[in-house]
Amino acid sequence: MWDEVTLGKRTVKQLFLSRLFGKMILKGFVKDDSPLKRYLPAVDGIKVK
């Protein structure tokens, strides 16, 4: 599912909090080459049921 979102085949609605804090969080993720942390929250459209 994540591949579909990154390739543009599926769209996911942006949450209100991500609009407010998105740039600040993104800068924290891409400041270095460390891997993403485990157990980060996911958008409902991407969760596997």
Image (spheres, grey):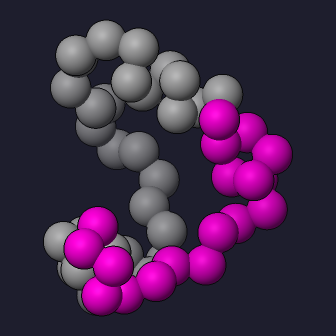
- The percent coordinates of residue 4 (x first, y second) are 24, 80
Which residue appears at 33% of the width and 79% of the height? 8
On the picture, is 20 further left or further right than 7? right
Asked whether the viewer can see residue 11, the reply is: yes
Looking at this view, name the residue that lies furthest to the top. Answer: 32
Residue in the foreground of this view, choosing between 39 and 33: 33
Q: Is residue 17 part of the magenta span, yes or no?
A: yes
Which residue appears at 58% of the width and 32% of the height? 25
On the picture, is 33 further left or further right than 12? left
On the picture, is 25 further left or further right than 8? right
Tell me the quadrant of the picture where the C terminus can be found. Answer: bottom left
Q: Picture quarter containing residue 22?
A: top right
- The percent coordinates of residue 33 (x first, y second) are 22, 16
Asked whether the viewer can see residue 47, the reply is: no
Q: How many marks?
A: 0
Q: Is residue 18 above or below residue 42?
A: above
Which residue appears at 42% of the width and 27% of the height? 29
Q: Is residue 37 above or below residue 15?
A: above
- The percent coordinates of residue 9 (x first, y second) are 30, 88
- The percent coordinates of residue 10 (x first, y second) are 36, 87
Q: Is residue 34 above or below residue 45?
A: above
Tell me the quadrant of the picture where the N terminus can be found. Answer: bottom left
Q: Is residue 2 above or below residue 11?
A: above
Looking at this view, name the residue that lies furthest to the front. Answer: 8
Residue in the foreground of this view, choosing between 37 and 24: 24
Which residue appears at 25% of the width and 74% of the height? 7
Please provide the residue range marked out in magenta. Answer: 6-23
